[in-house]
Image: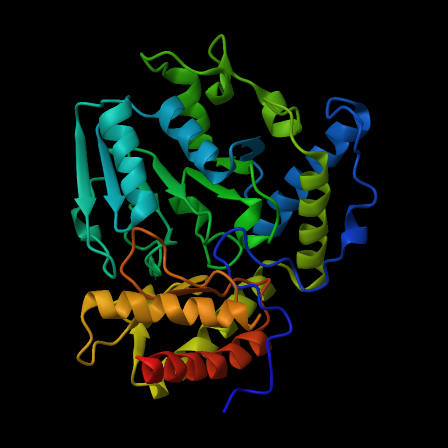
């Protein structure tokens, strides 16, 4: 029978993600619309996002935090174009976005000394092969594969190169050891349930030293420039953004950060995300037709972008894809779950956001509907 209990908030997209549970349109009432972001009040709002982010993440005082253009993609591109080229590079890739950074480094920057450490969807590369005498580029969480790094133990304390980490679907949901990372990036639209188009660039002291001691040989687009005359443009890290931000999006980010503080801070956010994964784990354990795409066990399962695959039972890959697609449509038509199909380049299946802005009770209700949808689709087939 069709379930009677529906998720109160059927928003399980992996980006943009669900708003925080207390969000309301009135939160944006004080947005500085029609005002310059360079005005005293505008810069104060932008600086508040920076300060609240630094405090929530527990970043060391010598780290810099800036708001940059073009979401997480822009933040990663800025780091790659500004910092790479001083030494060889190891790029780790095990899903779509990591492979995108491979394309940047190899085909766009055209660096000569690049090693690509790659793995198929569901797996991690051999972390023991990473050479920390070189710069390292990696995602922390594979947003399109549901496979995350288990910890930071594999990163050398005495590394000579920089570790540049795309952490967009990990930060504020998974523990990050800032002593093992030199650059991290994320966007408001993921972990905070914020709006798109704005990225966050987090620079550690070793990355700052590289910026001041090394000048890349290629032309630098204006929106990537972090230095002027060999010195860091410190205004970027005080709210003096490179281009014009949306002050409505800024107000929305402040709403999310304030909710995070009220909810108990970083540990509470991580706890909420882990609880969400636990709901899905319990359901998968008792459900024969579904499994995690991640093959490496619980330590490598993402608690945010939870990727699931239909277990073959006489189904071809094409059948799995059509079954998953039909389920996604059926659940959306029922207003039970929106945007839970797997990423376009990933193996066919389901992808359910389990970040802190999602309530576990809604995921619990969703699992019952998933069972119903699978039964309906396979019965019709």
Query: Can I make out residue 117 in this image?
Result: yes
**Vertical arrangement, residue 311 with respect to residue 306, above or below:** below
Query: Please, which colouring scheme is shown?
Result: rainbow
In this rendering, the answer to whether 283 lies above or below 358 is below
Residue 215 to residue 16: above or below: above
**Residue sitting at 44 percent across and 27 percent down?**
78
Quarter-of-image position of residue 40: top right
Residue 304 in percent (x, y) is at: 46, 61
Pinpoint residue 323: horizontal percent, then vertical percent: 32, 71
Q: Is residue 354 left or right of residue 300?
A: right
* Residue at x 59% of width, y 59% of height: 18
Residue 280: quadrant of the picture: bottom left
Residue plotted at (66% across, 64% down): 264
Horizontal placement of 288 versus 65: left or right? left
Q: Is residue 8 left or right of residue 165?
A: right
Question: Residue 225: x and y, percent?
Answer: 48, 18
Of 241 and 308, which appears nearest the observer? 308
- Of all residues, the one furthest to the front in this rendering is 380
> How many numbered marks are there?
0
Where residue 69 sits, quadrant-wise, is: top right
Q: Position of residue 13 (x, y in %)?
A: 50, 59
Q: Is residue 133 visible?
A: no
In the orientation shown, which residue stands out farthest toward the bottom? 1
On the rendered structure, is 202 left or right of 246?
A: left
The residue at the point 37 percent across, 51 percent down is 140
In the rendered image, the quadrant that contains the C terminus is bottom left
């Amino acid at each position: 029978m069709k379930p009677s209990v529906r998720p109160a908030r059927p928003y399980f997209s992996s980006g943009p993600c669900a708003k925080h549970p207390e969000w309301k349109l009135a939160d944006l009432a004080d947005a500085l619309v029609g005002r310059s972001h360079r005005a005293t009040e505008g810069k104060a709002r932008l600086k508040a996002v920076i300060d609240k982010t630094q405090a929530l993440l527990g970043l060391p005082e010598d780290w810099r935090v800036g708001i940059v253009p073009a979401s997480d993609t822009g933040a990663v591109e800025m780091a790659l174009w500004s910092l790479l080229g001083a030494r060889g590079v190891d790029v780790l890739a095990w899903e779509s976005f990591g492979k995108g950074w491979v394309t940047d480094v190899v085909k766009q920057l055209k660096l000569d000394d690049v090693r690509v450490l790659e793995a198929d969807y569901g797996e991690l590369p051999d972390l023991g092969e990473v050479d920390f005498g070189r710069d390292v580029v990696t995602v922390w969480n594979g947003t399109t594969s549901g496979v995350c790094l288990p910890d930071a133990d594999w990163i050398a304390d005495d590394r000579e190169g920089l570790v540049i980490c795309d952490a967009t679907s990990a930060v504020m949901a998974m523990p990050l050891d800032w002593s093992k990372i030199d650059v991290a990036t994320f966007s408001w639209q993921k972990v905070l349930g914020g709006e798109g188009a704005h990225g966050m660039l987090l620079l550690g002291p070793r990355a700052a030293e590289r910026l001041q001691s090394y000048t890349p040989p290629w032309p630098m687009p204006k929106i990537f420039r972090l230095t002027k005359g060999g010195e860091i443009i410190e205004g970027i890290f005080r709210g003096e953004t490179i281009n014009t931000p949306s002050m409505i999006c800024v107000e929305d980010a402040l709403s999310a950060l304030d909710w995070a503080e009220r909810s108990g801070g970083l540990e509470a956010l991580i706890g909420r995300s882990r609880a969400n994964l636990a709901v899905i784990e319990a359901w998968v354990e008792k459900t024969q037709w579904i499994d995690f795409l991640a093959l490496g066990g619980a330590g490598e399962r993402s608690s945010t972008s939870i990727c699931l695959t239909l277990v073959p039972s006489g189904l071809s890959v094409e059948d799995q894809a059509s079954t998953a697609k039909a389920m996604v449509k059926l659940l959306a038509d029922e207003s039970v779950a929106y945007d839970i199909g797997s990423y376009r380049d990933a193996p066919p299946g389901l992808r359910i956001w389990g970040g802190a802005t999602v309530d576990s009770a809604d995921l619990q209700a969703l699992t019952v509907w998933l069972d119903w949808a699978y039964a309906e689709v396979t019965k019709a087939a």
